[in-house]
Image (cartoon, rainbow, N blue to C red):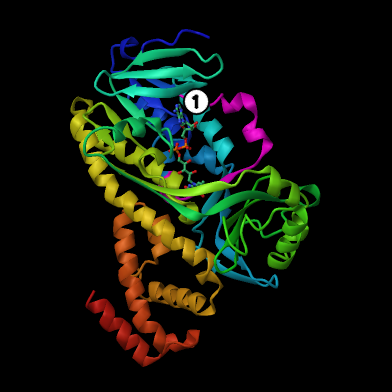
């Protein structure tokens, strides 16, 4: 192995160290390099560009406006949009295979299905094009000496341990961050982790002949089933990446599905329109791991002005709003804005403002993600809920600017913070609770009593 230069002595401009070359670490490397810093990145895993993408498995993520803004800040959004698939609507599949459609936003507003592996590899390629970025793979952070500013790293292949000194360190090492673990051992650090009693399993909906999509391509598909659900996002090769979110224990649970026959009969009864499109279902069900779903909150995110957590290391959330990566990319945007404002001479101020600005927003996003779990698995199958969504669409058209649906505020309004979006969403939901008893069918919206109540509610807002 090449000797790894000591990060504190590589250049005259302040060298920075990033732990983790995942989605957030690789984007952050680009931002910091563009600001003129030598950047050294350490990553525990091997280089994904040499390993093949996750063993050939296709795993995709929904990328939306906050994420796009993070990517646009370093000029890479359009390259990535080329390999994304816009999803303009949710398509709900009921137990008989009947479909209901709900647009995500107005006109051409869409969230994008992006392959996680390709996105990460593209960001790594772009980061490494910057001459002052050095990414070293197969290096695991095992210990962190915060006062002494030294990383203890292990070369994963050889087991060889070595130390690296740093001036400033960014912990982008994900939900089970080793950087955060060191911060947790300092005085007055709050930390909580909350697991759902649900796990997830990634499965495949196969491409049709000649790579045709066998479900509507430009949509996120949902099979809501009360206390659990399956979703599917499209891939460029015609397949869909499906994810089953399912209880660990109980009648209908991972624990209850122990044999291929049990899996096949449960899926046939529960997802009858999807099963014929899932020829590898039972193999994948037992071959693919069951992932857990955790919300992690902690504070502070900074240690003096020398260490800062970003991305999942600071705020891991459950995936039901499709915002974890988007929030992490927004971290990069905000950090860059604060550096623009205060300059590198004021890292203490930058880190302090960063954590105080971001924490209420990522806490709100964590709550929103848990709230959306109930909406996706349960409420989207309820005709009253779908009627309410249609009425909200009408209110939004009648009072543009004043009434923006919660989903749009979170997903398509990057100038609105997550905390503002959540507060406004709760105010609007309270109004809907008062309005909906007056509405049985869509046309009732035009009733004078409905219009009068709405006008009154909006004038007292
Ligand atoms: C099922 C599921 C679906 C999701 N869907 C969406 C979605 O649709 N949209 C969305 O926005 N978000 C989604 N997310 C969330 C998203 O995956 C995360 O928010 C995002 O990956 C966070 O990026 P990160 O760089 O902070 O962490 P990670 O992507 O976890 O990267 C952390 C990196 O640090 C490395 N590392 C860890 N420990 C060490 C160590 N000790 N030493 C060195 N390196 C280390 C890891 O190997 C990894 O490469 C989903 C998450 C899940 C679980």
Q: Foreground residue, 209 or 384?
A: 384
* Residue 409 image position (x, y, % from top left): 38, 60
* Mark 1 Cβ and ligand 1 under 8 Å apart: yes
Residue 308, given in percent of the width and then of the height, sits at 30, 32
In percent of the image, x 25 and y 37: which residue is there? 338
Position of 194 with respect to 354 (left or right) is right
Residue 222, located in which quarter of the rendered image?
bottom right
Residue sitting at the far bottom: 448
* Boundaries of the magenta span: 42-68
Position of 326 relative to 174 (above/below): below
Secondary structure beneath dot 1 equals loop
> Badge 1: few (under 14), some or many (20 or more) residues near its Cα, within 10 Å?
many
Q: How many marks?
A: 1
Residue 340 seen anywhere in this rendered image of the structure: no
Residue, x 33% and y 61% (percent of image)? 422
Task: Work out whether 161 lies above or below 125.
Answer: above
Q: Quadrant of the C terminus?
A: bottom left
Image position of 422 (left or right of 379): left
| Closer-to-camera residue (334/451) | 334
Q: Is residue 40 visible?
A: yes
- Residue shown at the point (39%, 59%) measured from the top left: 368
Residue 141 colored in magenta in the image: no
Where is residue 377 drawn, in percent x and y?
54, 65
On the image, numbered disc 1 is attached to which residue? 44
Residue at 29% over, 63% down = 423
Give coordinates of residue 439: x percent, y percent: 44, 87
Q: Any magenta on residue 65?
A: yes
Q: Is residue 84 left or right of residue 3?
A: right
Above or below, 7 against 408 in this view is: above
């Amino acid at each position: 192995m090449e000797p790894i230069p000591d990060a504190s002595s590589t250049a005259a401009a302040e060298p920075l160290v990033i732990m983790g070359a995942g989605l957030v670490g690789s984007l952050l490397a680009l931002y910091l390099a563009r600001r003129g810093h030598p950047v050294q990145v350490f990553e525990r895993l091997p280089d994904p560009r040499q390993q093949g993408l996750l063993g050939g498995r296709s795993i995709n993520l929904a990328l939306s406006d906050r994420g796009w803004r993070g990517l646009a800040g370093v000029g890479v959004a359009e390259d990535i949009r080329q390999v994304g698939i816009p999803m303009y609507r949710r398509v709900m599949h009921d137990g008989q295979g009947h479909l209901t459609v709900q647009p995500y936003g107005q006109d051409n507003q869409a969230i994008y299905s992006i392959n996680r592996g390709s996105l990460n590899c593209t960001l790594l390629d772009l980061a490494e094009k910057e001459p002052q970025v050095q990414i070293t793979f197969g290096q695991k952070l095992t210990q962190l000496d915060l006062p002494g500013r030294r990383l203890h790293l292990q070369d994963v292949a050889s087991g060889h341990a070595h130390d690296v000194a740093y001036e400033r360190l960014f912990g982008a090492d994900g939900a089970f961050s080793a950087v955060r673990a060191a911060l947790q051992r300092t005085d007055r650090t709050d930390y909580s982790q909350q697991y759902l009693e649900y796990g997830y399993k990634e499965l495949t909906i196969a491409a049709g002949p000649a790579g045709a999509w066998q479900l509507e391509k430009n949509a996120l598909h949902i099979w809501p089933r009360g206390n659990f659900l399956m979703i599917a996002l499209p891939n460029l090769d015609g397949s869909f990446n499906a994810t089953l979110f399912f209880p660990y224990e109980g009648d209908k649970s991972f624990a209850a599905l122990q044999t291929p026959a049990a899996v096949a009969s449960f899926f046939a009864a529960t997802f009858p329109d999807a099963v014929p499109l899932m020829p590898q279902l039972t193999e994948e069900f037992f071959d693919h791991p069951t992932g857990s779903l955790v919300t992690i909150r902690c504070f502070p995110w900074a240690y003096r002005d020398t260490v800062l957590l970003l991305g999942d290391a600071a705020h891991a959330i459950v995936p039901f709003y499709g915002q974890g990566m988007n929030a992490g990319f927004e971290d990069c945007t905000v950090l860059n804005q604060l550096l623009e404002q205060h300059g590198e001479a004021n890292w203490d101020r930058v880190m302090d403002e960063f954590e105080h600005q971001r924490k209420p927003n990522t806490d709100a996003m964590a709550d929103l993600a848990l709230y959306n779990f109930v909406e996706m698995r349960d409420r989207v199958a309820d005709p009253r809920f779908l009627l309410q969504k249609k009425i909200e669409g009408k209110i939004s058209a009648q009072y543009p600017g004043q009434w923006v649906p919660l989903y749009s505020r979170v997903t398509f309004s990057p100038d609105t913070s997550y905390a503002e979006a959540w507060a406004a969403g709760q105010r609007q939901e309270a109004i809907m609770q008062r309005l909906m008893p007056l509405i049985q069918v869509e046309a009732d919206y035009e009733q004078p009593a409905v219009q009068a109540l709405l006008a009154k509610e909006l004038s007292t807002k």
